[in-house]
Image (spheres, helix red, strand yellow):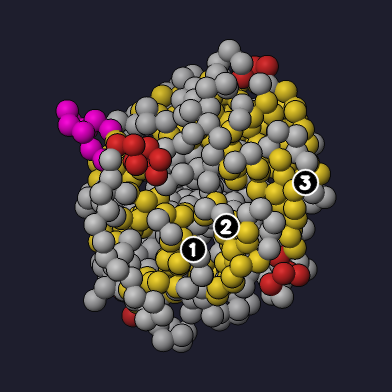
């Protein structure tokens, strides 16, 4: 039985959309002045191909044009449209500033305008995701409770507020995607982060809303209904990046996380297998086919029905109880925590002599995957680097259609071979793969000898940008052909988020001293600003 729920709040008319080449350019491509959400556009490529001012000649001359001081950490990729840069801060505000000089246009406090309480481990109500440009509206994901809100882009005035999950620990950590009057976004939870509590009942879902009113049009869950009771399947959240939309196929693609818990009979089955996992592309015999954890899923944009889902790990049940050695509350293992912390990117490649339209994503396991967009079949896969419960790839790869670029966090500090060389590092780094084959073209270690959890950004098919979580906040530009670092700037605080590019500038925020970073990464530092580096 398909795991979708078509809500009766509004009838959705199916209609034939006639698209011409010009329309496709408008819907899926960039101009040099637009970065609409976390992924940049409908394809979720984190790419600015039309930003021609930034190139191998000019990139080494990038300089700081302006700095906007918000006062606290900024970890979301800034959104850019019509000469305005939009971003949230962990101080609870959302900001709109001028792209040319950083002057404040407006700021809005999320807690004050919505009346929502702060999420756990925080004293303010915040957004941690890139706002989504939706015509004259700006749609903002709220970290917890699981709401999204829309404000008028010109003023920040609240238009609507919609709850996406009833559980108190529900959150929206992903940025949404806007298309033809609708807004698509995934729902996640902090329920699995409570090792002292019985776990769990949350189910991940993808939601389509009317962008004008906030009305939920459909909501499709990633795992079977557990009746809100402990003892069933839980987890499979949708928490990173922004959904990718295939205009011609009328499909929306996302990636999902691990299971938080599984039924007792499933755990008994797994224990009988001596807690052995299966290879990533083999189906675990203990878990049914409609349990879509660690998966890439394609949904019909009109009905919300799942067209296909490809699970890309073996058995994977993990919650924070598993971080405590010999904890009896940890489910039967292995507890590999091999989420997809990003939605796939949409591109076309040549494979075995023919064109293939593929969805490409990188997993916390360190594997990069290219799947056929029509049926979810694996076209190629590649181990890009070490995996761990922090990654592997996380928050957002990038592509220019020629190469696929990803971070490798290497949170466990494993030996990381800088393929195609034989040199190794224990830091994180960045990897470029041939988009057609998955072959590793180059690997660059993080020169600050830190992990690399932030997403990457490709500009003009030529320059790759990435930040470092080092305390002084280095921001790097690399030659996309070779991985050579050709420019850097120390922002003064940890960079955990990604960059956007527009108007001959690259915009990035600094600081990540909040949330679980306080517990697991005490050397990461507090920041306060968004920077504009321009040519």
Dots 3 and 2: beta carbons under 8 Å? no
Q: Residues within 10 Å of mark 1 (few under 14, many from 20)?
A: many
Q: Toward which corner of the image does residue 504 lie, by quadrant?
A: top right
| CA distance separating discs 1 and 3 | 26 Å
Residue segment shown in magenta: 349-357
Q: Position of residue 137 (x, y in %)?
A: 57, 57
- Which secondary structure dominates the residues rendered in magenta? strand
- The x, y position of residue 188, in whole percent, is 52, 66
The CA span between labels 3 and 2 is 18 Å
Give me the disc on residue 137.
2
Residue named by callout 3: 104
Q: CA distance from mark 1 to mark 2?
A: 8 Å
Q: Is residue 340 above or below residue 162?
A: above
Residue 147 appears at what percent x and percent y? 58, 70
Q: Nearer the viewer, residue 303 or 486?
A: 303
Instruction: Say few, some or many: other residues with alpha carbon within 10 Å of mark 3 (under 14 / 14 to 19 / 20 or more).
Output: some
Q: Position of residue 211 (x, y in %)?
A: 49, 63
Residue 283 is inside the magenta segment? no
Determine which residue is flagged by label 1.
Answer: 211
- Mark yes or no: residue 493 visible: no
Residue 209 occupies which quadrant of the picture?
bottom left
Q: Quadrant of the N terminus?
A: bottom left
Position of the C terminus, as image quadrant, is top right
- Secondary structure found at label 3: strand
Disc with the residue nearer the chain's start (1 vs 2): 2
1 and 2 marks in contact (CB < 8 Å): yes
Relative to 239, 94 lies left or right: right
């Amino acid at each position: 039985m398909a795991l979708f729920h078509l809500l009766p709040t509004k009838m959705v008319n199916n209609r034939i959309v006639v698209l011409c080449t010009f329309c496709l350019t408008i819907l899926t491509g960039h101009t040099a002045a637009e970065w609409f959400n976390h992924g940049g556009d409908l394809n979720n490529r984190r790419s600015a191909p039309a930003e021609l001012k930034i190139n191998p000649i000019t990139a080494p001359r990038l300089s700081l044009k302006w700095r906007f001081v918000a006062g606290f950490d900024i970890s979301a990729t800034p959104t850019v449209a019509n000469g305005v840069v939009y971003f949230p801060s962990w101080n609870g505000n959302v900001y709109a500033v001028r792209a040319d000089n950083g002057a404040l246009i407006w700021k809005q406090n999320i807690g004050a305008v919505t009346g929502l309480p702060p999420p756990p481990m925080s004293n303010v109500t915040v957004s941690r995701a890139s706002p989504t440009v939706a015509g004259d509206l700006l749609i903002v994901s709220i970290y917890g409770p699981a709401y999204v809100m829309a404000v008028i882009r010109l003023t920040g005035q609240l238009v609507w507020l919609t709850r996406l999950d009833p559980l108190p620990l529900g959150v929206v950590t992903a940025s949404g995607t806007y298309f033809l009057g609708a807004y698509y976004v995934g729902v996640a939870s902090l329920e699995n982060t409570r090792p002292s509590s019985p776990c769990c009942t949350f189910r991940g879902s993808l939601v389509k809303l009317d962008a004008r009113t906030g009305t939920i049009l459909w909501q499709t869950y990633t795992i079977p209904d557990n009746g809100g009771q402990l003892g069933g399947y839980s987890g499979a959240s949708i928490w990173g990046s922004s959904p990718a939309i295939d205009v011609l196929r009328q499909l929306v693609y996302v990636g999902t996380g691990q299971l938080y818990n599984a039924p007792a009979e499933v755990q008994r089955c797994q224990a009988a297998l001596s807690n052995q996992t299966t290879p990533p592309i083999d189906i675990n015999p203990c878990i049914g086919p409609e349990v879509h954890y660690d998966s890439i899923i394609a949904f019909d944009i009109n009905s919300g029905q799942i067209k296909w889902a490809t699970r890309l790990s073996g058995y994977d049940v993990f919650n924070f109880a598993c971080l405590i050695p010999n904890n009896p509350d940890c489910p039967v293992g292995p507890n590999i925590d091999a989420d997809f912390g990003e939605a796939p990117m949409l591109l076309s490649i040549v494979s075995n002599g023919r064109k293939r339209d593929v969805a490409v994503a990188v997993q916390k396991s360190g594997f990069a995957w290219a799947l056929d967009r029509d049926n979810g079949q694996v076209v190629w896969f590649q181990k890009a680097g070490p995996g761990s419960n922090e990654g592997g790839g996380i928050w957002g790869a990038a592509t220019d259609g020629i190469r696929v670029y990803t971070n490798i966090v290497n949170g466990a500090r494993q030996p990381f071979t800088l393929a195609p060389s034989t040199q190794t590092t224990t830091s994180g780094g960045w990897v470029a793969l041939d988009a057609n084959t998955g072959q590793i073209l180059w690997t660059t270690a993080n020169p600050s000898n830190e992990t690399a959890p932030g997403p990457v950004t490709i500009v003009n098919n030529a320059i790759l940008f990435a930040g470092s979580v080092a305390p002084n906040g280095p921001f790097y530009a690399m030659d996309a052909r070779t991985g050579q670092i050709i420019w850097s700037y120390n922002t003064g605080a940890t960079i955990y988020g990604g960059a956007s590019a527009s108007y001959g500038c690259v915009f990035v925020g600094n600081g990540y001293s909040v949330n679980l970073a306080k517990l697991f990464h005490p050397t990461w530092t507090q920041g306060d600003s968004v920077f504009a580096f321009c040519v």
